[in-house]
Amino acid sequence: MANIYISEITREDLPYIHWVENLEEYWHINEHPGPYTLEEIADCFFPSKIYALHKQQRWVIRKKDEDFPIGILDAFNFNEEEKSIGVGILIPKTSNHNKGYGKEAIQLLLKKLTFDNQIEKVFALIDKDNFASLKLFQQSEFIFTREQMCLNRIVNRYEKLL
């Protein structure tokens, strides 16, 4: 392990976030699909939003031996009453797939989310044909709970109690 680390978004990360948010093949998973301007990205993600206040937060995933981001993690739809939050991960370059970065990033995120005892349940909403994400969350001990509608499509909901 310890091949990657996650960090809050810095101003230097904004061009990377801008690039990722403007990849058309992922617009279907966004509540507000692009295209985005760099200014819109800055307004939306910088300074880093804190889930307890804004119901969401985003981090960048970085390789230990490089300082350039390789992906992003999201925590969204924080529900204070249920002590739950949704999580998502995107590592867009296929050259970074199947190396354990995703599983390690999810584990690091779960540690961050449990640190302040505000979260007891984490969920992921995954497209039924996204086999890589389904496998990742199953390997991370998330359990399928049901199908549900999300952004006009049916997704699989996986949950994990912390």
Image (cartoon, grey):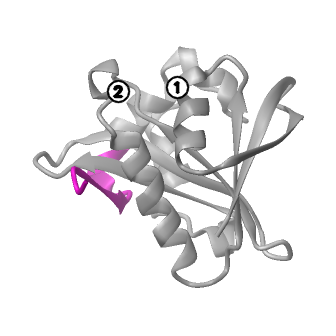
Residue in the image at 87% along x and 33% along y: 147
Label 2: which secondary element: loop
Residue 10 locus on image (x, y percent): 33, 58
Residue at (73% x, 52% y) in the render: 159
| Image mark for residue 85 | none
Magenta region includes residue 2: yes
**Residue 102 in picture, x, y percent from top left:** 41, 41
For residue 97, the mark is: 2
- Quarter of image, res 19: top left
Q: Are marks 2 and 1 in contact (CB under 8 Å)?
A: yes
- Per the image, the residue denoted by label 1 is 132
The residues bearing labels 2 and 1 have C-alpha atoms spaced at a distance of 9 Å
Residue at 84% x, 72% y is 82
Q: Is residue 26 visible?
A: yes
> Observer-nearest residue: 152 or 95?
95
From the viewer's perspective, is 20 left or right of 143?
left
Judged left or right of residue 30, residue 88 is: left
Check disc 2: other Cα within 10 Å, few if <14, some if 14-19, many if 20+: few
**Range covered by the magenta-colored residues:** 1-14
> Would you say residue 75 sits in the magenta stretch?
no
- Residue 46 seen in render: no
Residue 29: % across, % down: 67, 29
Q: Please, is residue 95 above or below residue 14 in the view?
A: above
Between 160 and 22, the residue placed more toward the observer is: 160
Report the amino acid beneath label 1: Ala
Above or below residue 112? Residue 136 is: above
Which corner quadrant holds the C terminus?
bottom right
Secondary-structure class at tag 1: helix
Q: Name the residue: 20% across, 42% down.
A: 68
